[in-house]
Image: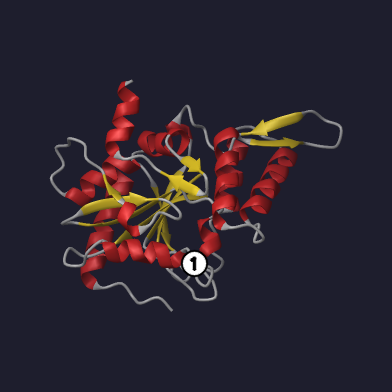
Amino acid sequence: MPAPIGARERHAQDRIIHLFQHTLGYQYLGNWKDRPDNRPIEETLLTRYLQKQGYTTALISRALHELQTIAGDSTQPLYNVNRAVHGLLRYGVKVKADTGEQTQTVWLIDWKHPENNHFGLAEEVTVKGTHDKRPDLVLYVNGIALGIIELKRSTISITEGIRQHLDNQKVEFIERFFAPLQLLLAGNDTEGVRYGTIGTPEKYYRSWKEPSPIENLLDRHLTQLCSKARFLELVHDFIVFDAGIKKTPRHNQYFGVKAS
């Protein structure tokens, strides 16, 4: 089983949860250490969101089935599954309410209006696998896990958090939890945050550099990367699947595109 969280990590994690709740506007979903059957797609949350968007029960059922089928395809490598899920997130799920009816698009995320989505944060999310793992913080958008944050105390290098991400993606651990994941972050108070995505080697995890009045590096980077509009923009506009490699932008690439 995963090791229990230490007192120093607990203090930092509590502060970051407060940041996400009160500065970034995420809903705290709870401590899911002992919650059974944690999944990367929380159907209750996603169904509730889609109902609010006015989709019929039939369309919701078919869209969820399509999403779960693709995300749960164990015959394909994680890269292929993740690319297919990203396509459903970005372009919507094309389904028919019934045989013979016209195809409709069910949008799992409202990309144009970030505040119209439900942003949630759960901590200590125990995931069952051949060997169970427990990511520190999981970011959910409309019940879909799009981000994971591994936090370390200031005296422990964030490379340890990056290595946790890499280990967790292995088949013998919780690889399939990463089917919808888009951003993987590791951080502490002294180094701030480094980020990558599925399959990113340790040496290619990058820091984010952007002016800010926030002095604490961890708080600064998380605020910059995980604000609702920025987070969705990175996922929608700056994720690239290139010949078997999934890529996220460096800060200079992001601002270069924005300035062009």
| Residue located 78% across and 36% down the image | 97
Q: Position of residue 222 (x, y in %)?
A: 28, 46
Q: Position of residue 133 (x, y in %)?
A: 45, 70
| Residue located 13% across and 45% down the image | 215
Relative height, residue 63 to residue 34 (above, below): above
Instruction: Name the amino acid type tagged 1.
Output: Lys
The picture quadrant where one finds residue 152 is bottom left
| Residue located 32% across and 48% down the image | 20
Q: Position of residue 23 (x, y in %)?
A: 28, 42
Left or right placement of residue 160 versus residue 84 in this view: left
Left or right placement of residue 258 versus residue 157 in this view: right
Extreme-front residue of the structure: 243
Q: Is residue 27 visible?
A: yes
Comparing 167 with 94, the one in front is: 167
Extreme-right residue of the structure: 100
Q: Which residue corresponds to mark 1?
A: 170
The colour scheme is secondary structure
